[in-house]
Image (cartoon, grey):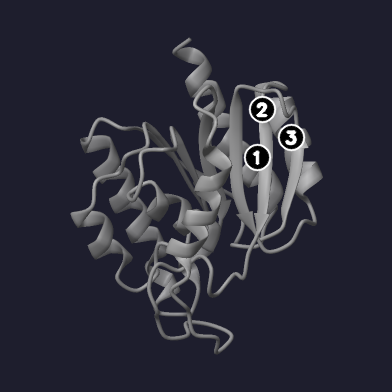
Amino acid sequence: MQTYEFGNPDAHIVLIEPIHTVEGMEHEADIIKELAGPDFFLQAVRVDWFNDLSPWKAPAVFRNIPFGDGAQKTLDEILKLTGNPDKEYIIGGYSMGGLFALWACCQTDRFLGAAAVSPSVWFPGFAEYTASHRMMAEQVYLSLGDREEKTRNPVMATVGDRIRELHEQFCSQSISCCLEWNKGNHFTDPDRRTARGFAWILKELQSYT
């Protein structure tokens, strides 16, 4: 997997984000710096959107492309980026990347925070999975566009209910968690939305130091 780097490589905090395109990443990094300061190093890992981020196989929901089961292999590769014990790691992503971030933090305690931005929590079987697996991240940022649950796609239309349930679940587990609603649909301003997610976690961490 190809990795793109932004920010300060000597920073104590490392942000890791699976992406399907590098377009917009520099802008995202600039917004994170504007919102939360320069003390971060962002590593963006390019992946196959339909295979590398889904934890198990599932039928096509849109574009007639079925989902693979490559999430574990992707996580194994990403964990190789987290080997410095003197640094703290946050994982995040948009859409399927957000789903992957939540799933990954139910697999390992290596990440202090998860920024799940417009996450694909409509994914078949994911609600049942999170109900039976503990979230290990200490901070979780959730967000959704206010038009995302208004889609005609019956599977994807469940995203609003699913994300509300997750927010309630994480809060009940004493996890520092917020749910932010943004204007627009799933494709509105993803780089700024993702930056806001990472920045929220960075500021949460700063408040404890």
* Count of marks overlaid on the render: 3
Q: Nearer the viewer's eye, disc 2 or disc 1?
A: 2
In depth, the one of 162 and 11 nearer the eye is 11
Quadrant of the rendered structure where residue 176 is? top left
Spatial CA span between label 2 and label 3: 12 Å
Residue depicted at 50% across the width and 73% down the height:
151
Q: Element type at marker 1?
A: helix
Q: Is residue 95 above or below residue 57?
A: above
Residue 166 located left or right of residue 9: left
Q: Element type at marker 3?
A: helix
Which class describes the residues within 10 Å of circle 1: few (<14), some (14-19), or many (20+)? Answer: many
Q: Element type at marker 2?
A: loop
Residue depicted at 53% across the width and 38% down the height:
82
Residue 131 located left or right of residue 143: left
Q: Is residue 98 above or below residue 56?
A: above
Asked whether residue 27 is in view, the answer is: yes
Q: Residue furthest bottom?
A: 64
Tell me the tag on residue 182: none
If the image is split into quadrants, where does the N terminus sit?
Answer: bottom right
Residue type of the residue flagged with mark 3: Ile
**Residue 26: x %, y % from top left:** 80, 43
Residue type of the residue flagged with mark 2: Phe
Residue depicted at 62% across the width and 57% down the height:
184
Residue 56 located left or right of residue 206: left
State which tag comes first along the sequence, 2 or 3: 3
In depth, the one of 68 and 174 nearer the eye is 68
Spatial CA span between label 2 and label 1: 12 Å
The answer to whether mark 3 and mark 1 are in CB contact below 8 A is yes
Spatial CA span between label 3 and label 1: 6 Å
Residue under label 1: 195
Tell me the tag on residue 31: 3
